[in-house]
Image: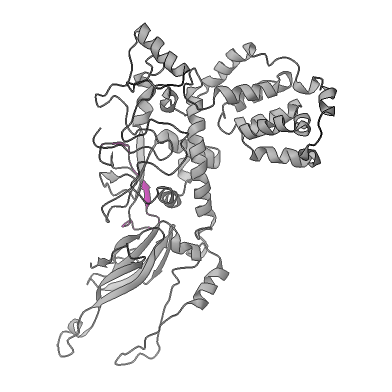
Amino acid sequence: MGEYDCYCAFCSGCLYVPGAYGSDVFGSEAREALERRRERLREKIQAQDHTYDPTIVDHDCLKWLGSARALGMNMEARAASKAFISGRGTYSSYGDFNPEHGSDPNDDGTNPLPCFVSYDEDVPPAYPFHEACYRLFCHALFGHEDMNQIDKDVMYSTMRSLSGDRDTSCLSLDYGGMEGPEHTWYCISGEEYTVFKPSTNPKLIDVLRDLLPNQGFSGPSIDRLSIDSELETKVRNDIFSMLPLDILYMLFPYLSSETSINLMNASWHVFKATRRNGFWKQMIRNHILPWFWEFDTFIQTEDLDHIECRGLYVWLEGITRPQFGIRGPWMGLANRRRILNACEQVKKVYLKLKEGNYGVQGSHCGNGTDDDEAEEIKDDSVSLHLPAILEPKPAAELTTSVQWIRAWDEVESPGKIFESFWNGDGVLAGLGVVINSHRRVLGPTDEVPGIRKFSIDVPDAEWIEEILLHLTDPDILSEDESARTSAVKGLTVRSDPSPFRPHSLTP
């Protein structure tokens, strides 16, 4: 697989089908070998040959890993929106993702796309992902899998802000402690669940119905069980007893499953308040349905009043927990839980960018920022007006202006693009910036026939320090009118801090 691998931005899984390049993926099926493998798993020890258990994983199970795309950025796209989803592709080597030319209008067919880090200033980094994982992110964001609702420019800024400053092969996320994504992908025995497809699987409800009768959840619900009054008299101090029940119940949606159980074990007051079946029905809705949405079908068809919901909750949470050595029909669901945990981390940054912490509150007036803050920035700015030296002097001086920075957070925002626009004679016609898909331009854009656009990507946490205009020397004695005119035919952009080297733009 070349020098090193890059991985899916959402799940940190490999971007190709393991074994497709001749590497060994499956261990021996000999009885002695399988027994040794499983004994090591019981002792939480990894196998040494970096292969999967052949009785758990087969080639069909791995095919979904080969359905990958990338989120890229085309700075020369005509529209203000510049991000795109590539066609399907696969990871090759040395940090390259090789996609087909996709149908996205912003996809210019660049191939290969550099993953996570780009060493070519003309090609921004791209962020590869599995199609199944992108759908999971949509589900985490909207509750459905309509990928068209994602703002690709904000998504690109999100990925970029999570990619870190150093060379990386995935985002800076908690992917659940998996050890497969090393310098190259390792098939770790005991981590087979990480390569199971996490997509919606209606058959899980049939599995659940088959297993439930053997779990003992059809007895009396816990709220009918007697509470040991003698144990209650031994409680000397319980700080949580001061919490009213309505306030207490409002806390649980914000607590993890593990924290919720620990709180019940630590407080007698909380234990008593949460013993009723109705409470555990709500716990299932709050903690189980977000990642096991097929279970909603079960709820619609089964009467949970005749099921001990506390036991059902603890059982479902335990058998689907993503952890080393998990086996059985729930491995795809365990992988979904792991990936959705990473998606929730991405979701927080995406919503922060989308809702305005980096100046994106909507598209009204093309600004997306608070007008009061924009006005404050304008008032505190220094504007050096130069006198107009023209002969003959125009009857009225017509000036136009545009404010590029309308919120202080925009200076450090990811996803900033500087644009310049040039007419057919190669003369500067307009300047502008795009910040999180909001374009602010002084002068005509490339939507005007004959106007060409050149762009540069402004790195994160940097801003433009100066723009040097390169003017032609006029020949006032020339009979050619164009030669007697001085025009801007090039510019150099410098930024602060200095690591962003100067960029020269000449059409």
Verify whether residue 84 appears in magenta.
Answer: yes
Q: Quadrant of residue 417?
A: bottom left
Q: Where is residue 389 in the image (x, y as percent from the top left)?
A: 32, 90
At 36% from the left edge and 18% from the top edge, which residue is drawn? Answer: 58
Kindly report the secondary structure that dominates the magenta region of the rendered protein.
Answer: loop
Location of residue 66 with respect to 40 vertically, above or below = below
- Is residue 99 shown to the viewer in this render? no
Residue depicted at x 42% and y 78%: 400
Magenta span contains residue 6: no
Quarter of the image where one finds residue 229: top right
Give the image location of residue 171, x and y in percent.
41, 43
Please, which residue is most extreme toward the top here?
A: 31
Quadrant housing the C terminus: bottom left
Q: Residue 502 appears at what percent x and percent y? A: 28, 66
| Residue 212 horizontal side relative to residue 175, left or right | right
User: Which quarter of the image is occupied by the N terminus?
Assistant: top left
Q: In this view, does 58 lie to the left or right of 247?
A: left
Q: Determine the residue located farthest toward the bottom in the rendered image.
A: 392
Q: Position of residue 262 (x, y in %)?
A: 66, 32
Q: Give the range drawn in magenta.
A: 75-92
Q: Nearer the viewer, residue 381 or 421?
A: 381
Report whether residue 505 is seen: yes
